[in-house]
Image (cartoon, rainbow, N blue to C red):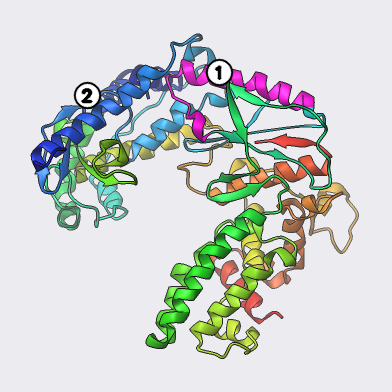
Amino acid sequence: MVTDTNLIANKFNDFFINVGQSLADKIPPRSKSYQHYLSKSPCNSFVVAPTSPEEIIQLGRTMHITHSSGLDDIDPCIANPYLDLLALPLAAIFNASFMTGIIPSALKMAKIIPIFKQGNRAEASNYRPISILSYFAKLLEKLMYVRLYNYICQNNFLYPLQHGFQSGHSTAMSLIDLQDKISLAIDNNEFSLI
Amino acid sequence: MDHVILINKLENYGIRGLQLKWFKNYLDQRLQCVSCNGATSRLKTIKCGVPQGSNLGPLLFLIYINALPNASSILNLILFADDTNIFLSHKSIETLFMIANNELSLIADWFKANRLSLNLLKTNFVLFRSSRKHLPVFDYSLSIEHSEISQVKSAKFLGVHVDEHLTWNVHIHNIEKKIAKNVGIMTKISYLLPSLILQKLYYALIHPYLTYCNISWALNYSTRLDRLMKLQKRAIRVITKSKYYVHTFDLFRQMRILNIVKINILQTGIFMFRYIHKALPLNFKDYFTFSNEIHNHNTRTKETLRPVRFRTNYRKHSIRHSGPMTWNNLPWQIRSLKILSSFKNALRIHLLTAT
């Protein structure tokens, strides 16, 4: 039992860092390579278009400003109204990042908040890590997200029955799809498995 | 998620050179610290996985598992982010299980090759069949990596319980319990609160259960929906502070609330509107056909949609039949609207006034 708050925070950090690795270690060694399953690589390449202050200001309007601040302690609700002043230097920094392929290390730090799920409160595995990134890191990510997502959609790379994380798709859609398949199978006097 | 594999996959999708370097940099050398109860830990480097709480993370995850359907050419995979559902059907139950066992081992190989762990405890299967169909005496089982998968009568698919005879009874019973509890709470405190607040409570505590995936489960025999209907009526009477014997039709209209059956029509209508305006995901592309795609005669019904033929009511209750039927029954003034929001409004008003 640990009671010192600093020690608790450090213990949590150790746990969350190692949980993925220990899970990965348990997976039996591969028999086939993952490359075996990949489809043929396309000829066209992904090109990142540079950003502009206007795009950043536009993006700022879609940001959730109620989210709490990351490790830089800059509250989104303070930074967001002044985005039109910040947009010019930010655009320069983000473009430099796209041009060099390097992300400023200050934007790669995350603050983790453990959220209790259920079970024993003294057990670190009963907490889910929620990470909070800096407001500016989120801006940079959103810029890249828009570019990558458009590229993927234009080339139709994604599996059409993948309903997660995509606009226009919802849980109801995948349920409709499933219901359609099952009812068709029953109508054809078939058994089906899920 | 393994960073090396992810980078290789990105390269496979045509992300090369500088752009690839950016993503490598994005994943590498990330620091995190835990903050709780005012204390902050030291910064440490993250070893695997994509950054949580980021925008790009989910997209990178989709790219990571995008090749999963390539593992098997027979199985139908329905993915919702990391929630994988596999669907397979066959006339003969013996063949069905033989194919399923074979294909599942291919899927398991994929998971191993991609360094992902499969939570076998959370994996189970449902054998769907008509309730009139007798199961042949046959000892069937499914297994992945020599550990058997348990059979269940209903599975939770994205928060909706889908049962083996597609009756939706398990789901309806589940939300009935939740709604009954919440109606009880509202009844007990109703004497303290004005109608307006009670209405807000209704939308927070009861309405979401009735609308969630309503398009699938509410197209059902009325006997199965009966108890939900009664609960909804009770809630309406509580909001309007009416006596228990008051007829609810006018109350529904007065509160501008739709009942379960009408919510279903509304949702089906919206689905069909999005189909007609090509705003649905790609996999619904060829779901329905127009009459004029079948024949060239200039008939009165040439602009209507053809409902699919059905042998059983299971099929009749699916969107392929109900969708065109609902759409064709709408007044043409509503059908001809061009904007989704005005379509929704018009349809809602139409349903509120309809008997």
Q: Which mark is residue A100?
A: 2
Q: Which amino acid does label 2 sit on?
A: Thr
Of the two numbered discs 1 and 2 in the rendering, the one whose residue sits closer to the viewer: 1
Q: Where is residue B270, by image quadrant?
A: bottom right
Residue A58: where, in percent of width, then height? 30, 52
- Quadrant of image for the N terminus of chain A: top left
Residue B234: where, in percent of width, then height? 57, 79
Residue extent of the magenta highlight: B94-122
Residue at the farthest top position: A31
Residue B92: where, in percent of width, then height? 82, 29
Residue B285: where, in percent of width, then height? 67, 43
Residue occupying the point 13% across, 31% down: B43
- Under circle 2, the secondary element is helix
- From the viewer's perspective, is A12 left or right of A193? left
- Under circle 1, the secondary element is loop
Q: Which mark is residue B145?
A: 1
